[in-house]
Image: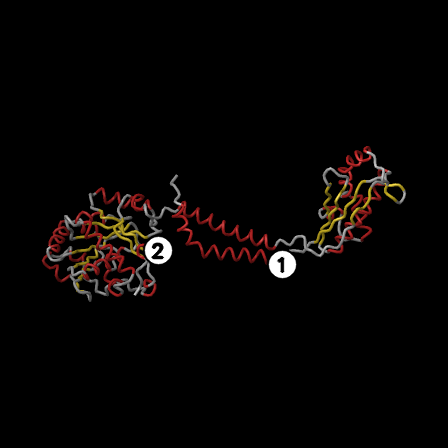
Amino acid sequence: MEEIDIKDFLGYLKKYLVPMIVVALIATGGSIFYNLAIKTPMYKTSTTVVLAQQTGDKTTSSVTLNDISINQKLVATYTEIVKSKLVLEQVIEDLKLDTTAEKLAKHVTVTAIEDTEILKITVEDGNRIAAAQIANKIAEVFTKEIVNIYQLNNVSVIDVAQVNDKQSNNTTVRDAAIAMLLSVFGVSAIAFIIYYFDDSIKYSEDLEKKIGLPIAGKIIKSEIEKKTIGDELLVDKYPKSIVSESIKSLRTNLQFSNVDKGFKTILVTSANAAEGKSFVSSNLAISFAQANKKVLLIDCDLRKGRLHKLFNLPNLNGFSTLLTDELENYKKYIKKTHIKNLSIIPRGVYPPNPSELLGSQKCKDLIVALKGKYDIIIFDGAPCNGVTDSVIMSTNVDETLIVVRDARTPKKTIDVTKDSLQKVNAHITGVVLNGVNRKVAKYYSYYGDK
């Protein structure tokens, strides 16, 4: 069983803060509404009787130990007699109640005061006046029946039941508190279950250890992404934004990780589709171009590549058609962009054999030729899950980056992708964690969208 990181879970739980508040408000409001508008108010009142032998109209003051012993033994029996049909049916008849002995018994409680000869008869009813009348009538009928049954006049009423104006079942505050706590614990429990069985990659201090790969960069979520839907070239449009700073940090990490041997070609791939590899590759290319590097961005996702859409370029002639043409004609496939120092080769038409084209000797020779013309060449590859295009392409480049989506990409998928690339001896620079929550990545918190 994997160890649970409490700090990590508390950060994950923040995603459920709004649902937790909504559920708590609904549960608490529902509890209050039920108590105030639906639940029938009930009222309790009590009368007490004592087992004490009487003589004439006065209670004798000379009670023997034998009398006390006998009365205490009778307490249990008398308790049952109070709630018997014999007593309750007489009460119903005398007060003309619209109920049965069985139903009335549910609202009657008889308590024997410990080590005494006193019985406390409590009645709960929706009518506070009726509750007092029933309690007193039970005591009266009970006293008479004891005389009839035992020929004893040893029951006296101590306290007569009074009308109680205080509602006995008013538990609004308690029920509201319980409802709120249960809803909070309930949502937390559901969140914990989802978290426990969630295998997705989530940013944490020990993430590199978990996935067995270095974190080459973290792309921080930004509000400007919501404002520029359809325009993903954020490094060009917002060069001082959080996203741009994240991309620049990735560029710097790549440069420092290859100080000794240097690099010219980078493949950007992902485990699954929709992880953000085209977003990362295009913005990384712009970042290198802004650093006065002569950059060529090539779309080698020959199946679903979309760089031509991001840069608003024609796609009729591209990388797929170049690989079937003569290599010396490569210049006519290179498209200039509006960004200084950045050129693009779009994917071209969808070929019937993408893997064969990427694994061909012509592809290798083309890359060698292009490396002599550009400082940096970035390849936007296909996702590794399901196709071998990027696995093949990784053998032709210096560095390979795997883009994963924070809190979305399953760890098992990362493991499969890593194993596939390592089997062909690809040089995996690391993982680019895309879509990281700004609050989680505290290091970047001082940057602002501009």
**Image coords of residue 245 (percent x, y):** 26, 59
| Distance from Cα at disc 2 to Cα at disc 1 | 43 Å
Q: Secondary structure at mark 2?
A: loop
Q: Is residue 20 above or below residue 77?
A: below
Quarter of the picture containing the C terminus is bottom left
Front-lying residue, 5 or 275: 5
Extreme residue toward the right, this view? 56
> Pointer 1: what residue?
36
Three-letter amino acid code at disc 2?
Asn
Three-letter amino acid code at disc 1?
Leu
Q: Residues within 10 Å of mark 2 (few under 14, many from 20)?
A: some
Residue 336 located left or right of residue 238? left
Front-lying residue, 104 or 148: 148
Residue 97 located left or right of residue 295? right
**Image coords of residue 190 (percent x, y):** 46, 49
Extreme residue toward the front, this view? 61
> Pointer 2: what residue?
437
